[in-house]
Amino acid sequence: MSLEFTVEGKNFLAAGEASSRLKHTLQHIGFPAPLIRRVAVAAYEAEMNMIIHADRGALKAEITPKTVTIWAEDEGPGIPNIELAMQEGYSTAPDYIREMGFGAGMGLPNIKKCTDIFEINTTIGVGTKLKMVIFNKQDPGSL
Amino acid sequence: MEKGVYSIFLDEERCTGCTNCIKRCPTEAIRVRDGKAKIFADRCIDCGECVRICPNHAPIPQSDAREKTGQFRHTIALPDPALFGQFKTKPSPRQILAAVAALGFDSVYEVAWAADAVSIAIREFIQEHKGEGPWISSSCPVAIRLVQVRFPSLTEQILPLLSPVEVAAKLAKEEFSRQLGIPPQEFGCFYLTPCPAQVTAIRSPYHLEHSYVDGALAISGLYCELREKISRTPEQNEPVKATAPGLTWGRVGGQTRAVQSENYLAIDGINNLLQVFEEIELGKFNTNIDFLECQCCQGGCVGGTFTVENPFVARVTLRRMASQLRPKLELEEEQEVLEYYRKGYYRAEKDVEPYSIMCLDKDIAKAIYMVEQSEKILKQLPGLDCGSCGCPTCRTLAEDIVCGIATETDCVFKLRERVQSLAEQMLALALKVPPVTVVQRQIMKTQREVLELAKRLPPVLAKPNQEKEGK
């Protein structure tokens, strides 16, 4: 099944709603708790990235018994240096965002840790597309 | 914890089917069917929210019968710290303990003292596992069950340490057994509890195979008698064993104070717990919080459904009473507790297991299909979460329909739509006049009026239906 949520840039009131909804759906399906945690953290980091940096975006998910695939696609500034952005602690978030407790430079590294496949496509001034795949390792069919 | 063990029962005679409870339940465990609330046993976590909201007092929290104490050779009362907040007039902590004994117990053992010991154990454990937090306190059984059923991935962050009441019972049986030469199994430990979830936690413990506690008696059930006993107990000013921080475990913030945690959150109220757990599961607080004091009831255990005093008053009373106690343990006592800790005395015997009550089917492929169907059904429902169908939200109705325990026409708005379309069909038929008859204008007018009425929509959802008609 597929799900799609829109994400509004700079709207911190709705922060985490899309990932929360995705997480609840996975719980209703009955995926194992560790997988749900990985999806939740990856989706949340991606959602927060869009809220912090982008103008608008969408969080999409495709759910099968063996895999959960998430796409986070936004219209925004893009990532100038992916290698730097993938380093723990590197962040381009402005001070006011850091004061809110975000922008610790852990977003993308965290996503990488939580996912089995992680792809970034970014175009400066246009936007960024993330693809995240998480395998359900407890499903006997996926081994 | 065993599934389906819970301590809140519904008095069907009092229940009017008013739907107040279904909306308040944090695990969506209640439905109204045939005009009466029904609690799904495997979903109930004993939080007591329905007990608080019900205008008819139909949900009744249960505790053990007093007669159960008769089964034991030597009975020990374990008064919860929250008990001390229930008496704002005069009595000293020692006087309250004496009155508890006067209820007919052979001995009294202070749960507040066990709380002192558990606080040190928690402090040590957190220091040893720095950076692995946040650790969720394991004394509130509702918080534990909330994690099990709604935040299963957080179960491994529950502190693997026994709750003060279990430690109190364990210590009490050992100490009195040594003193009196009676075998531990002949002691009956009875917890004077502020909360029905503790009753369940004793019947079906989450950290132990078998509880050390033998029964739980509601504070509210003993309140009148206890007041009377207090009034007959002479003033007693000798100190009690517990310290001030141990006694304040009964109110929110007390655990944190006793544990002396620097990076902590003290959360009370089930909705606040839901919000914080949600954020933790998304990875929000992981790096900088060591300890989460979780209290399901507003104000902490003084707000439990088995308490009598207003929780805000009880908080103040408890603080005042604590100020009469010594501020901390002696160094030797602390050393002894640490020794016990190193021997694993306070350690849980088993891990808290997650159990999923939210999933629609065991077969993942089937569950995905069912969730997909329920999303489709949800889009057709009015989205008012009015509760008239007996489900707390439109989403739960959609899920219940997919699970086969409800039908779409349980929704009054869907039912009205159906009635409307049936009425239209009937009118269309009725308007067909037999060719041999002359049309009577009055009848035609009435029929049109009826049709108009059938078309009229509830004021709360005029638009979506008009759009549907336009298609």
Image (spheres, coloured by chain):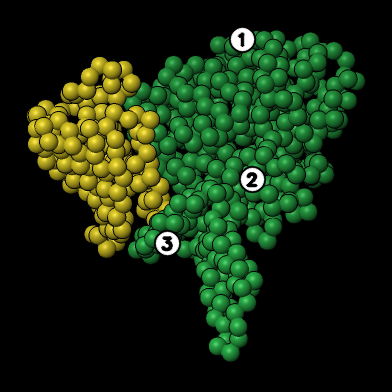
Chain colours: A yellow, B green
- The chain holding disc 2 is B
Q: Are marks 3 and 2 in contact (CB under 8 Å)?
A: no
Q: Are marks 3 and 2 on the same chain?
A: yes
The C terminus of chain B: image quadrant = bottom left
| Mark 3 to mark 1 CA distance (whole Å) | 73 Å
For label 1, the crowd category at 10 Å Cα-Cα, with few meaning under 14, some 14 to 19 and many 20 or more, is few
In this orientation, which residue lies closer to the viewer: B327 or B60? B60
Q: Nearer the viewer, mark 1 or mark 2?
A: 2
Give amino acid for label 2: Cys
Coordinates of residue B56 in the picture (x, y in percent): 75, 44
Q: Is residue A81 left or right of residue B277?
A: left
Q: Judging from the image, what secondary structure is the residue with disc 2 in?
A: helix
Name the residue beneath numbered marker 3.
Answer: B469
* Residue assigned mark 1: B327
Query: Is B392 displayed left or right of B311 in the figure?
Result: left
Residue B275 visible: yes
Question: Would you call the spot at circle 2 few (<14 residues within 10 Å), some (14-19), or many (20 or more)?
Answer: many
Residue at the spot of label 2: B21
Name the residue located 63 percent from the left edge and 14 percent from the top edge: B244
The structure residue drawn at horizontal position 64% and vertical position 45%, both measured from the top left corner, is B21
Spot occupied by residue B357 in the image (x, y as percentages of width and height): 49, 52
C-alpha distance separating marks 1 and 2? 42 Å
- State the residue at coordinates (53%, 48%): B460
Mark 1 vs mark 2: tell me if same chain: yes
B153 over A62 or under it: above or below: above
Distance Cα–Cα, label 3 vs label 2: 36 Å
Residue found at x 74% / y 36%: B218
